[in-house]
Image (spheres, helix red, strand yellow):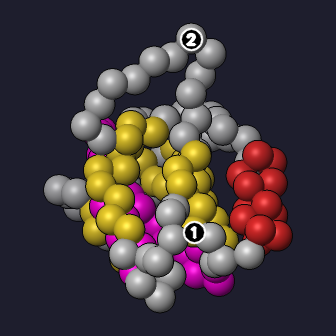
Amino acid sequence: MKRVVGIALLAIAATPLASASAWANWSLRSLTNNYGQIVSISLPFAPGESRQSDKYLVRGNMAVVVPGQGAIIFTDKGHNTPCSRPYWGVLIEYLDKKWGFYYDGEGTVDLKVNADGSIALTPGPAGQIVPGGGPPKCS
């Protein structure tokens, strides 16, 4: 188990924190852990940045480590949709699965880690989760 977590943390450290040329603010509105172990969040903090919030504001990439399973990687893709709405996108990868999270402005997503280590993603208002990471439905 230590090896899996170590590899996941190494993967997080190797992930650029701001790979998109432009991005909007999105938030992990809630994280529910129903897994039998502690999960941890890796959030980027720019030099000199300080935050106080009731949600986890993200600007760029982040990860959630699930011991014994791997890391849930959130990669900010900036404006990568064919739509004017939703405009912004985040690629979410975990184990062998991918999802696209698409939103406008201050998008939010809820993450639930289930007892078996699987995850459930729920977008906030006007957001979309697309299995496989495909394009969103334009509105």
Residue 98, placed above or below residue 71: below
Count of numbered circles on the image? 2
Image quarter (top left, top right, bottom left or bottom right) of the N terminus = bottom right
Image side of residue 1 versus residue 64, left or right: right
- Circles 1 and 2 in contact, beta carbons < 8 Å: no
Q: Label 1: few (<14), some or many (≥20) within 10 Å?
A: many
Residue at x 73% of width, y 41% of height: 16
Cα–Cα gap, marks 1 and 2: 29 Å
| Residue type for callout 2 | Gly
Q: Is residue 11 visible in the rendered structure shown here? A: no
What percent of the width, then of the height, locates residue 112? Answer: 36, 70
- Residue at (39, 37) in percent of width and height: 57
Note whether 66 is above or below 49 in the view shown: below
Asked whether, in this view, residue 121 is left or right of residue 126, the answer is right
Query: The residue tagged with tag 1: helix, strand or loop?
Result: strand
Of 23 and 66, the residue lying toward us: 66
Name the image quarter holding the C terminus: bottom left
Magenta residues (range): 93-114
**In the figure, is residue 56 to the left or right of 47?**
left
- Name the amino acid, label 1: Val
Mark 2 highlights which residue?
Answer: 48
Q: Reading the chain from its start, which is encountered first: label 1 or label 2?
A: 2
Which residue position is annotated with label 1? 66
Q: Is residue 102 magenta?
A: yes
Label 2: how many residues lie within 10 Å, few (<14), some (14-19) or many (20+)? Answer: few
Residue 47 appears in the figure: yes
Q: Residue 35 in the image: x percent, y percent?
A: 44, 76
Q: Main secondary structure of the magenta part?
A: strand
Q: Secondary structure at mark 2?
A: loop
